[in-house]
Image (tube, grey):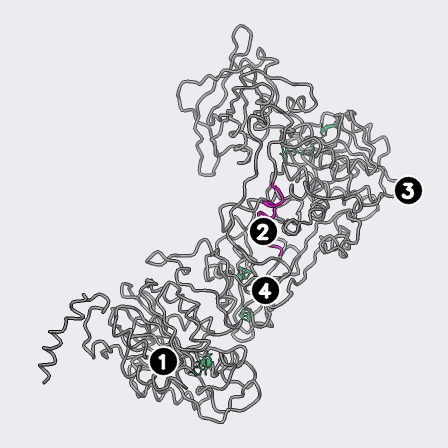
Amino acid sequence: MRPTDTRNPEYFHKVVDCQYACPAHTPVPEYIRLIARQRYTEAYLVNWESNVFPGILGRTCDRPCEPACRRGRVEPEPVAICRLKRVAADNKGDISPWLPDIPATKNGKRIALIGAGPAALTVARDLMPLGYTIHLYDENPKAGGFMRSQIPSFRLPESVLDEEVDRILDMGVDALLSQRVESLRSLLEKDYDAVFVGTGAPRGRDLDLPGREQAGANVHIGINWLANVAFEHTAKIGKRVVVLGGGNTAMDCCRTARRLGGEEVTITVRSSYEAMKASPWEKEDAQREGIPFLPDHTPLEFVIEEGRLVGMRFDRVESVYDENGKRSLVSTGEEPVFVAADDVLVAVGQEVAFPWIEDDCGIEFDRWNQPVVDKATFQSTNERVFFGGDAAFGPENVITAVAHGHQAAVSIDLFLTGRDMLADRPAPGTHLFSTKMGIHEWSYDSAVTPDERFDVPHLDNATALKDRKAEVELGFDTEIGFAEAQRCLNCDVQTVFFDSKCIECDSCVDICPTNCITFTDNGDEDDLRKRLMAPADDRNQALYVSDSLAQTGRVMVKDENVCLHCGLCAERCPTAAWDMQQYMYSVTKAAPIIKIDATAIGLPSVAARAAKA
Amino acid sequence: MSYIKPQFRHPQLPANERGFTRTAYEGLISTLCAGCGHDSISAAIIQACWELSLEPHRIAKVSGIGCSSKSPTYFLNKSHGFNSVHGRMPSVATGAYAANHELTYIGVSGDGDSASIGMGQFAHVVRRNINMLYMVENNGCYGLTKGQDSATADEGSKSRTGQINPFENIDLVGVALEIGATFVARSFSGDKQQLVPLIKAAIAHRGFALIDVISPCVTFNNHHGSTKSYDYTREHVQAGNIVDFVPSETEITANYEEGASHNVALHDGSRLNLVKTTTDYDPGDRRNAIAALQDSRANNQILTGLIYIDPEEPDFHQMMKIANTPLNKIEMSTLCPGTSTLTDINQSLK
Ligand SMILES: Cc1cc2nc3c(=O)[nH]c(=O)nc-3n(C[C@H](O)[C@H](O)[C@H](O)COP(=O)(O)OP(=O)(O)OC[C@H]3O[C@@H](n4cnc5c(N)ncnc54)[C@H](O)[C@@H]3O)c2cc1C
Ligand SMILES: Cc1ncc(C[n+]2csc(CCOP(=O)(O)OP(=O)(O)O)c2C)c(N)n1
Ligand code: SF4
Ligand code: SF4
Ligand code: SF4
Ligand SMILES: [Mg+2]
């Protein structure tokens, strides 16, 4: 193999598994260390700079970082990254001195944002410090998008949502609420320099089955129903409720129904229990509230008696997978199952809908009715119109919407200042520096000990089910927060190898607890992977290969997969051919977001970002 | 500040025939200098014992005094161990072996421990053909006492403070050949590919097995002018026989070139395949071995590999006709048959 080019910003970035997996690339280990040092305000700011909604995400994030977390490779459970974010948000101090200044004199450019969800709010936050005039349209009376209308208050208290949404609106955004945009053409005629579409995926699917029409008002589209609950148009539901669907929307529907008078609430899913789309923790939370799941049930009809809905009938099915892994549901031939219900909530998916975009606006749609959007710039086929969040590529989650928002903001700024959106796009900010402080001393806590993940305490069921707004998860206190933070392996502290210093004494090979390092003759990747000290069959994890070494001509090969970042290789190396160096990686943003001189207060990463932007 | 070895290991570590991973053969974290060759030798012992599927509790480690002699703490911490007096490990090993020949004995010594203070003991443990692996972790100096020249330092080698060693050196390989050792090898801590199979062969050999391992002292003897440094050793190594250890149950599958390999059958049914790199070399010929050693020395080279083996020679236990049952398994009444038996013996000797 060729020597690894560690100057490529993506190489070490990929080693920080959690940060790499996070769509917004939040510097996870850095904020976890700050939590361990009880510097909650700084931990919050590192998050806010990167993901805009730390308090919200610390409660609701889909957490793609956690399955990626390295800790999960040596222990059953990853670090509770998401819940640590909440610890920072719950315990932070005053952040106002850090917030960016908003120019009093505007730069003369006007931008319309349609939909006030996380994508559009991110665009607003990133562009306000540059002096743009921003009009934010939303059909609802309050901003927040699905974070407000869909995510129930028992998972996300209104006060947390308000705080983080208002912080952006208070930068001087013109929020045009309760105003649905009915025509893109007329909006474009209003002389906006750019338009960002962040309208989400607002159309919930219905189920056209026998009895649907007669069942009428007792069948509800899940997302519409949740929005009605959130905006207090709906306060009750029948005693017996059937929820159709196995995703997170279904989980929110059933748990909300339990709080609005539903006593026997049942989840029915066509798939197997294992194949359900909902996150494991959402399933657990629903089960903890006494909600039974009926997997492998395909709905056949709404059962109507005397003109009223009385329940639903289901066919028992089995999931059969063909050799390509494609699933088909095959009836078991058993008698259909009847489940009694006063109300049915349909949570079987949602999609984008653009009835308000006229054909002559220059926006092309593909054959799935998705707008044609550039994956790097988020620009549509009308150069003035950008898309992001669920509206761009279909339903995802809050953190993905934020990531889109950052990139759309960069593109809009480049576009409106006459620069090329790709060629002139700033590179991500990076910074690599040694953590060495003494012979066995590093500026991070390098010792690695077995510690199992802590559970987040929950409100008791009786209290929780009485009040739709009572938050169920209580969060870690600062003590557990510290203990959980200590589980982090500091994957951003990289093992950096200097081949010219190595005397091939093998000490690093011998000490490495997880046998990451091998000195051997070079070969191609397949060949090398077979000749290492320990199995190295996860091809998603890089091999770090050195140049050939002076004494024997062999190469150093390190499998990044299960490195614990314990620093022992560097401690055992007599010539400092290994060093533990902290790597900062910051996604390109339109403007510096944190105001105070970050180096002065010991936040090198924020400083690096500010310098780069 | 760390210096704690994490308990986590690679989740897919392979298990040996006894179901153990390498972890079962590890010891405490080393306190030797970073970069010390002795640590690599410890790692090679761990690897060899794991590959041989030995049971850790059926191994006894014995050592003298020195950095090298400390190192048994850093491997096999589920085995028996005796850290003895400077240069006196052979006596302890001899006693232990006489009492219980069923254990595997691994002796670890240094060049100071064996070639200076322990030279006398060394000579006799060789002659007696105690069934053990005897490792000399040879760094040409007294590491533990801050790097004074040892008796294996080459004439002309420069110490860290700049003095040239005026004395002839003792080559323990030559000494062992001379006084009848039945397994003699030399290796280098920086070459596990050679060292691990040699350790396996030495453990399988019935009788005394010396491996003199050049093991650079990174703190006191790894500078320019030293003849025991990493780079000097690498430049001057002459790899002799490369040993491929074949356990008894295994069929020979590797293909060796016609005439390029030599087979040695060991008493336990395992075999050594000796792949020759240079000329035809018969490791069963002691005179030939001594000549090869002299030749390489004359060429300013360090001969490594398996230099001599005699798998047939009876070991101490057989020579002394010691009871086959280890002492700790013999009934007290048999071991100490009482006054009347003693009287009978005494009577018979009158
Ligand atoms: C029930 C449910 C629970 C969820 N839970 C989570 C969770 O726990 N964690 C998570 O990360 N994600 C969750 N999601 C997904 C997440 O809410 C969305 O992916 C995310 O909010 C998308 O953000 P966005 O900015 O694209 O738009 P959205 O948040 O969807 O906001 C779009 C806004 O635009 C408004 N709008 C639409 N059309 C117009 C128009 N023509 N004029 C004016 N306004 C308009 C909409 O009313 C809405 O307010 C959940 C989704 C659902 C349905
Ligand atoms: C009887 C006695 N004499 C002297 C010493 C001092 N001493 C300790 S270690 C050592 C030399 C060790 O050299 P070596 O065996 O080569 O081991 P190394 O440290 O080089 O591995 C000496 C002389 C001692 N401990 N006991
Ligand atoms: S151990 Fe820490 S840095 Fe590594 S992946 Fe997990 S959370 Fe991220
Ligand atoms: S930091 Fe070094 S010693 Fe520790 S696990 Fe990684 S490679 Fe091994
Ligand atoms: S410990 Fe240092 S000098 Fe020794 S092999 Fe490893 S990198 Fe090279
Ligand atoms: Mg020595």
Chain bearing mark 4: A
Q: Work out how far the residue at label 2 is from the one at label 3, CA to CA, in angstroms.
A: 46 Å
Question: Bounds of the magenta span?
Answer: A476-492
**Amino acid type at mark 2:** Gln
Which label lies toward us, 1 or 2? 1
Query: Gap in Å between the C-alphas at discs 4 and 1?
Result: 49 Å
Give how far apart the Cα atoms at labels 2 and 4 are. Answer: 34 Å
Check mark 2 vs ligand 3: CB closer than 8 Å? yes or no: no
> Label 1 belongs to which residue?
B88
- Same subunit, tags 4 and 1: no
Q: Secondary structure at mark 4?
A: loop
The answer to the question of whether label 2 and label 3 lie on touching residues, with beta carbons closer than 8 A, is no
Image mark for residue A3: 4
In this rendering, is residue A418 above or below A577?
Answer: above
The structure residue drawn at horizontal position 62% and vertical position 58%, both measured from the top left corner, is A444
Residue at position x 50%, y 74% from top? B36
